[in-house]
Image (spheres, helix red, strand yellow):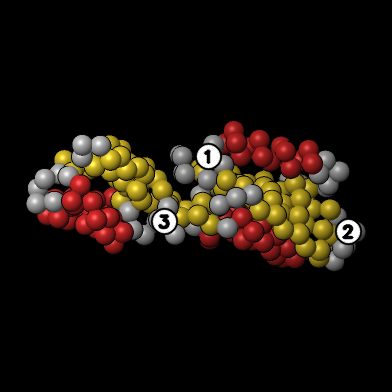
Amino acid sequence: MSDYITVRKHGRSSLTVKKSEFIGYCAHVTSEEEARGFIDEIRKKHSDARHNVYAYVLKNGNTARYSDDREPQGSAGLPVLGVIEKSGVTDTVIVVTRYFGGILLGTGGLARAYSDAARGALNDSGIAEFSYFRVCRAVFPYPYYGKIQKILSALNAIVDSVDFADSVTLVFAVREELAGNADSAITEACAGRVTLTRLDTRLDSDPV
């Protein structure tokens, strides 16, 4: 299971409902400052629009914010927030700009349009899934290199670096829940002739 799910890149969508244009923008952010900076950027870009509705969710502090930006209460910001929360992503901001087309949509119509625009922008961004990986260094004699390569490949580990000197020094990252398996398998494969050192823990995605 992924420990951290967020959007992969900036995304955009556009749809027209009864002559009103809804333009969705989605981005990865890591703080309220970044989220509000992105919101301000879209507001500036569409300063002539009647509404720039937004919502964002941040992992830090379990933060969720939204704004209807003068649309009827509950018809805009909350549906956008719902799209983010339903997708499971965090550290994500979505802004939906509306150019009013002269025809009232009603609360239900607005909610559907804002949701659709937000969902389109999020889908365009794509989703990136990350897990906690343990970063380790293994130092061992040359003859065991092939065996260790096979072990790390089977565990879907990430090889950060390999240095061939008097011995082989290999730095790799493996999912935290598989780190014990990696230690045991490498130690057994090297008949104990290996030095394993834990260096760090990081969020990363599985290699493709």
x, y (%) of residue 136? 26, 42
x, y (%) of residue 157? 32, 54
Marks 1 and 3, how far apart at CA = 23 Å
Element under disc 2: loop
Which amino acid, mark 2?
Answer: Gly
Q: Left or right? Give the position of 165 relative to 49.
A: left
Q: Residue at x 81, y 44 (%)?
A: 46
Which amino acid, mark 3?
Answer: Pro
* Pointer 1 local density, CA inside 10 Å: few below 14, some 14–19, many at least 20: some
Task: Pick whichever, 181 or 7, lies toward us.
Answer: 181
Label 2, on which residue? 101
Q: Left or right? Give the position of 76 relative to 181.
A: right
Q: Is residue 173 above or below residue 181?
A: above
Quadrant of the frame with the C terminus:
bottom left
Marks 2 and 3, how far apart at CA = 47 Å
Q: Residue at x 87, y 63 (%)?
A: 19
Q: Left or right? Give the position of 171 relative to 121.
A: left
Element under disc 3: loop
| Residue 193 in view (yes/no) | yes
Label 3, on which residue? 207
Label 1, on which residue? 30
Which amino acid, mark 1?
Answer: Thr
In this view, the mark in front (1 or 3): 3
